[in-house]
Image: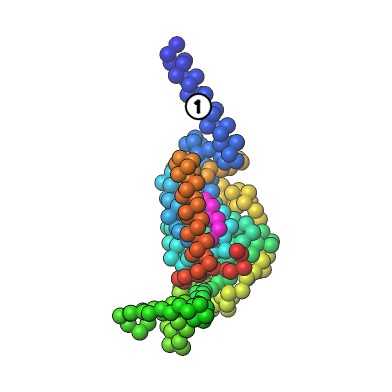
Amino acid sequence: MALALLGAIFLFFLVLIYLLAGFMGRTTSFPLGEKVGVVEVLGVITSSKKTIEHLNQFKKDDSVKAIVLRIESPGGGVGPSQEIHDEVRKLAEVKPVVVSMGSVGASGGYYVAVPARRIFANAGTITGSIGVIMEFTSVQELLGKIGLSSQVVKSGQHKDIGSPLREMTEEDRTILQGVIDDVHVQFVHAVAEGRGLPVEEVASLADGRIFTGRQAMEAGLVDDLGNLQDAVVAAAEYAGLDGEPRIVYPPKDKGEVLEYFIQEAVSGFGRGLQERTGTGLQFLWPGVE
């Protein structure tokens, strides 16, 4: 009777897990059978931490045989985009990685996709935008009108380069342009390596222009036109899975409800501030607010 009771409790919780997973619109990560993992890259890329954690979770999970990277992003910071790119490249050496682009997978959103074995886009997906951008806002005249001035003490001539409190000099512009050009070359080489294209061919497309998914396929930047399900099926085929593939998403770790809302409010404010001030190098298509 004790064994029967324990078995009944186990079955109850197993059914409960599956019901909750279906209610939340996610396939459970309960470790039974072989699955295709889906990692989402959503919105402006300001941090790589969570995405890398999810990629590594699936990399270590033997039941996850292939990974689909679902991208809905106009790009973001250079550093986080490069970090995710490198982790995708490492993962692709161990397990099949397929990319599915939604409405937009541009600039840094495209950068993180290029190490994958295969890239799917919708016919109207906005992609490409291979380039680097830095934006600076000058408030010097505004401060003068309201009677405020700034005094800067610095260790070198260019320590306050890009400051909104003074006009940009030609020397400042030359230095910043050199930084942007170097990072742009890194972007071009990453695309050429990931897509198996000549550097010169990628460079001819890397003037910041955007493409539709269909245009991108004609240019060799994506492989196929298709949706998320098409990408899942392709990933399962690469992994040698039979039948309809089971999908698993990374488990959500939001903590307590109050703590979650506080964290979301603070991080949302920080992301909004960073996006508006435009500080730092960015792989970003500015067409999405």
Q: Position of residue 254 (x, y in %)?
A: 47, 44
- Residue 1 in view of the camera: yes
Q: Look at the image and give the residue range highlighted in magenta.
A: 39-44
| Secondary structure category for the residue under label 1 | helix
Question: Relative to 47, is 200 above or below?
Answer: below
Question: Relative to 265, is 193 above or below?
Answer: below
User: Quadrant of the image for the N terminus?
Assistant: top left
At label 1, the amino acid type is: Phe
Extreme top residue here?
Answer: 1
Q: Main secondary structure of the magenta part?
A: strand
Instruction: Name which quarter of the figure residue 201 lies in.
Output: bottom right
Q: Position of residue 84 (x, y in %)?
A: 46, 59
Q: Is residue 43 magenta?
A: yes
Extreme front residue here?
Answer: 147
Q: Position of residue 131 (x, y in %)?
A: 53, 73
Question: Relative to 140, is 98 above or below?
Answer: above
Q: Which residue is labeled 1 in the image?
A: 13
Q: Nearest the camera: 239 or 73?
A: 73
